Amino acid sequence: MMATRLLLLAIALGVSLGLILPESQPASPSAATPAVSVAEAAPTAPGLAVVGTMISRDPDGHFYVDARVDGQPVRFLVDTGASLVALTVDDARRIGLNFSPAEFAVVGRGASGAVRGKPVVLDRIAVAGGEARQVRAAIIGEGLDVSLLGQSFLSRVGSVAIDGDRMTLR
């Protein structure tokens, strides 16, 4: 039940944040991070080259990927329903973002009500052979146990496909 509430909160947050934050800038290619298996090199969406990346479903039913955000490792739940990348407070601190919880304001609405956070723009996110620059995101104050890799990054990938227990980013 808690996982369902978290998923509903993440989806609602993503939709809400996507409506209120400005568009992000183009990306540029970079080196891979050893998070998932890499199948083949193939440039995709303009400004971002992500190689054929296969992600296996975790036993909890979700897809996770290890990425580098502004050079620091962050584990993400891949959330195709979230409009933005959403960072936990702990991940935001670890990657060196300066913020105070006093800066948090309502950034969206979730299943359990108002979602408080701080909109930010991440310099770069690197995932398995691709790097996106100037990625819209939000630091979420409460209710988020793992950072979410949402559409502000995923929309720069040519395609995201799920086949059984495998997700492919191309």
Image (spheres, grey):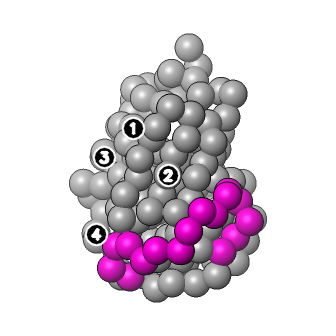
Label 1, on which residue? 11
User: At label 2, which amino acid type do we have?
Assistant: Thr
Question: For the view shown, which residue lies furthest in the front direction?
Answer: 40
Residue 17 on the magenta span: no
Label 3, on which residue? 16
Disc nearer the start of the sequence (3/4): 3
- Percent x, y of residue 67: 65, 63
Compute the Cα span from label 4 to label 1: 18 Å
Label 2, on which residue? 168
Q: Is residue 159 left or right of residue 146?
A: left
Compute the Cα span from label 4 to label 2: 28 Å
- Percent x, y of residue 69: 63, 70
**Marks 1,3: beta carbons within 8 A:** no
User: At label 3, which amino acid type do we have?
Assistant: Ser
Label 4, on which residue? 22
Residue 47 on the magenta span: yes
User: At label 4, which amino acid type do we have?
Assistant: Pro
Number of on-image labels:
4
- Is residue 69 something one can see in this rendering? no
